[in-house]
Image (cartoon, grey):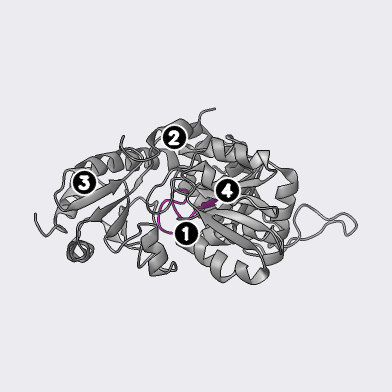
Amino acid sequence: MRFGTKLLHGEKTIDKNNGAVTLPIYQSSTFHQFDIENFGEFDYGRSGNPTRNILEEEFAKLEGGKYAFAFSSGIAAISSIISIFSSGDHLIVAEDVYGGTYRAITKLFNRFNIAFTFVNTEDVNNIKKAIKSNTKAIYLETPSNPLLKITDLKSSIKLAKDNNLLTIVDNTFMSPYLQNPLILGADIVVHSATKFIGGHSDVIAGLAVTNNKQIAEEIYKIQNGFGAILSPQDCYLVSRGLKTLKIRMDESERNAIKLANWLESQEVIEKVYYPGLSYHKGYDIHKSQSFGPGAVLSFKFKNIDQTKYFLNNVKNVVVAVSLGAVETIVSYPVKMSHAAIPKDEREKLEITDTLIRVSLGIEDIEDIVEGFKTGFLNK
């Protein structure tokens, strides 16, 4: 069964009891036990819920995994994965990781004596040099947020396996439709399902997937222990969004390719970052490990005045935090996704005050371009 069909016709997409074709919402916090000596599959909503379980099982298959866990947000999923490690452990992390991940690592987990080293993972040798005797995992994000830097997953995963390390990959930008890190050998994949998976700017959610039973048991302990679970209503919204993932991604990616090529020709633009451009660093690597360049790009203006004017005057898009929705979202990383990273650190990473990130939606590309033009000082 091909991916688009899987989205609509999984094993549990039709209710066996009544034929319902949408995910039932079991809005129940507790479950009656018919035999006090032998509890049923569900007892308390935090520990398990039929709606959540169905979403988790179906999503695991889409990502090429066996076990999936739905959380109340993307950062809840990420933090829960980091929580499987212990005091004294060391993790290697991609240096331009999502700002919320950076904040959790530097402001929360550093309190618990878990050490982190941030490295440029574009070069696998940088990862190799950072390995210590207490290193337990490599945390990757490719393409990265917001400069779309590419990490060679196959080489990084091989390095991890050679050193008995886990590989964790944030696959939010690509979704399971465009990239499958588990199939390439990664141990854990995380998503902010708020983004392309949900796809409609109406739900906050996170997902984590693995093929390893022991790792799955550890993740479940965290999910059940912390209780940062996805509610039945939000599970339904994520399930509904998933049904159109393929057609949304296809259209958004087409728009991204067209916009990236148009931006390249504009005098006010200094540089465009997009894996669909042949000169993009890591272009060939990305092409070898994914099924498309995706729907997110970034670009830099030549000066700050033009940057601010654009953000205040661009039309036919949404200027907001987040990405991966049916509407095109223009974001300003230094004040939004990466505001938690100190200015000097951001600038070392080339996340400057003139950088704009764009997540393409499904509007007509001509209207997006016209809207962008209204934000250019030199039209």
Q: Amino acid at mark 1?
A: Val
Q: CA distance from mark 1 to mark 3?
A: 31 Å
Q: Amino acid at mark 2?
A: Ile
Q: Amino acid at mark 4?
A: Lys
Q: Which mark is residue 129?
A: 4
Quadrant the N terminus occupies: top right
Q: Amino acid at mark 3?
A: Leu
Q: Residues within 10 Å of mark 3 (few under 14, many from 20)?
A: some
Q: Earlier in the sequence, mark 2 or mark 3?
A: 3
**Residue lying at the far top of the rendered structure:** 1
Instruction: Residue 199: say if magenta.
Output: yes
Looking at the rendering, the stretch of residues picked out in magenta corresponds to: 190-202
Q: CA distance from mark 2 to mark 4?
A: 21 Å
Mark 2 or 4, which is nearer the eye? 4
- Residue 193 position within the rendered picture, expressed as x and y whole percent measured from the top left: 50, 53
Mark 3 or 4, which is nearer the eye? 4
Quadrant the C terminus occupies: bottom left
Q: Quadrant of residue 38?
A: bottom right
Q: CA distance from mark 3 to mark 4?
A: 37 Å
Q: Which mark is residue 263?
A: 3
Q: Please tell me whether residue 271 is drawn above or below residue 8 in the rendered image.
A: below
